[in-house]
């Protein structure tokens, strides 16, 4: 799905980039741990990844803000302290 076709409200490009980094991390970690019920990542680990990746230059407050915006807009949902990717409908 192209971002232009995405039914969710637009976000700044840097927040979309954080979504791409975390989505890839969630997908990669899910293939390594097949016992997990749904692909997810711990929120604190997500912040650490965003602050240490070479793809972004973020401080922890920026990473927290990006995660909050992604949660508010429905890109992720939270179960306990775990972040899970919300998949858009296939319609």
Image: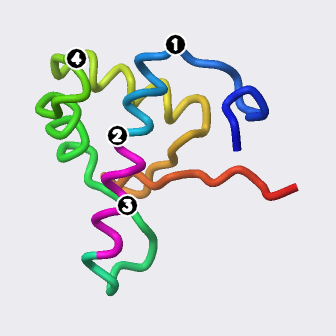
- Point out the image quarter for the N terminus: top right
User: Which residue, given by chain and number where applicable, does mark 3 sit on?
Assistant: 40
Vertical order, 41 against 1 (above or below): below
- C-alpha span from label 2 to label 3: 13 Å
Image spot of residue 36 (x, y percent): 35, 79
**Element type at mark 4:** helix
Q: Classify 10 Å Cα crowding around label 3: few (below 14), some (14-19), many (20 and above).
A: many
- Left or right for 83, reference 76: left
Residue depicted at x 32% and y 63%: 28
User: Which residue, given by chain and number where applicable, does mark 4 sit on?
Assistant: 61
Q: Which residues are magenta?
A: 22-31
- The answer to which of marks 3 and 1 sits earlier in the sequence is 1
- Left or right for 36, reference 74: left
Magenta stretch prevailing secondary structure: helix
- C-alpha span from label 2 to label 4: 17 Å
- Point out the image quarter for the C terminus: bottom right
User: Which residue, given by chain and number where applicable, does mark 1 sit on?
Assistant: 12
Residue lying at the far right of the rendered structure: 91
User: Which residue, given by chain and number where applicable, does mark 2 sit on?
Assistant: 21
């Amino acid at each position: 799905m192209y971002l232009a076709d995405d039914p969710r409200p637009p976000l700044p490009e840097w927040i979309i980039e954080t979504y791409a980094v975390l989505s890839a991390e969630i997908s990669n970690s899910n293939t390594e741990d097949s016992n997990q019920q749904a692909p997810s990542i711990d929120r604190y680990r997500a912040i650490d990844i965003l602050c240490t990746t070479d793809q972004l230059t973020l401080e922890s407050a920026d990473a927290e803000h990006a995660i909050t915006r992604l949660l508010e807009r429905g890109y992720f949902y939270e179960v306990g302290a775990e972040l899970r990717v919300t998949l858009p409908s296939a319609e």
